[in-house]
Amino acid sequence: MPRRLFKRYMPNPDSIKGNKSLRFLGKLIHDPNLWHLNRHSVARGMAIGLFWAMIPMPMQMLAAAAVAIPLRANLPISIGLVWLTNPITMPPVFYCTYKLGAWIMQTPPVRMPQTLSLEWITAEVAVLWKPLYLGSFVAGLILAVLGYALTTLYWRWWVQRSWRKRQEKRRLERH
């Protein structure tokens, strides 16, 4: 079952629940769906983590956790997927989301200078932020829907495959 794959990389829920910095969440952090690996909580966690990974903002993990807790999504998966956009992947990902936003807004994308400078970035922020956030939001929604659907389909396929194997094994044992 896919559960084994996820469990291998998941932190221990008791150590997270006992974390002093998370006490402000009170009983919310003790919801079993935040930690259990079932099809629905994992699929919701995938959707939330993929969405927030695409949004260019500081503290994406906090935003993912703030959405995952009330939606009863798997918390470690929601937070872990945010790291798809890390310091190495951020430039190409956000460049692509900017291009997507510029295409949706039907505005010509800003041409990159030969050398990137702080002055150029500060001057262009007023022009860049709208297509960047629109593209990020659209890409985040698309990835969230795909992540949810593909996780659900994969989980269902895995369970059906396991059932077929068990039935075949029982059939062979009878003969």
Image (tube, grey):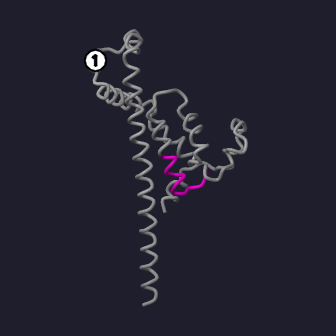
Q: Residue placed at 33% from the left, 30% from the top?
A: 96
Specify the principal SS of the magenta part: helix
Please tell me in which quadrant of the rendered image residue 85 appears: top left
Point out residue 67 in the picture as x, y percentages from the top left corner. Answer: 57, 39
Instruction: Locate residue 84 relative to residue 17 in the image: left or right.
Output: left
Neighbourhood count class around disc 1 (C-alpha, 10 Å): few under 14, some 14–19, many 20 upward: few
> What type is the residue that disc 1 sits on?
Arg
Q: Residue placed at 72% from the left, 36% from the top?
A: 24
Instruction: Answer whether residue 39 is magenta in the image.
Output: yes
Q: Nearer the viewer, residue 128 or 1?
A: 128
Point out residue 50 in the picture as x, y percentages from the top left corner. Answer: 45, 41
Mark 1 element type: loop
Please tell me in which quadrant of the rendered image residue 103 appears: top left
Q: Which residue is mark 1?
A: 111
Q: Is residue 170 above or below residue 22?
A: below
Question: Which quarter of the rendered picture does the C terminus lie within?
Answer: bottom left
Q: Is residue 137 above or below residue 79?
A: above
Q: Is residue 112 above or below residue 97?
A: above
Q: Nearer the viewer, residue 118 or 36?
A: 36
Q: Is residue 92 above or below residue 39?
A: above
Point out residue 136 in the picture as x, y percentages from the top left corner. Answer: 40, 31
| Residue range (magenta) | 35-46
Instruction: Locate residue 48 relative to residue 94 in the image: left or right.
Output: right
Q: Residue furthest front?
A: 105
Q: Nearer the viewer, residue 59 or 139?
A: 139
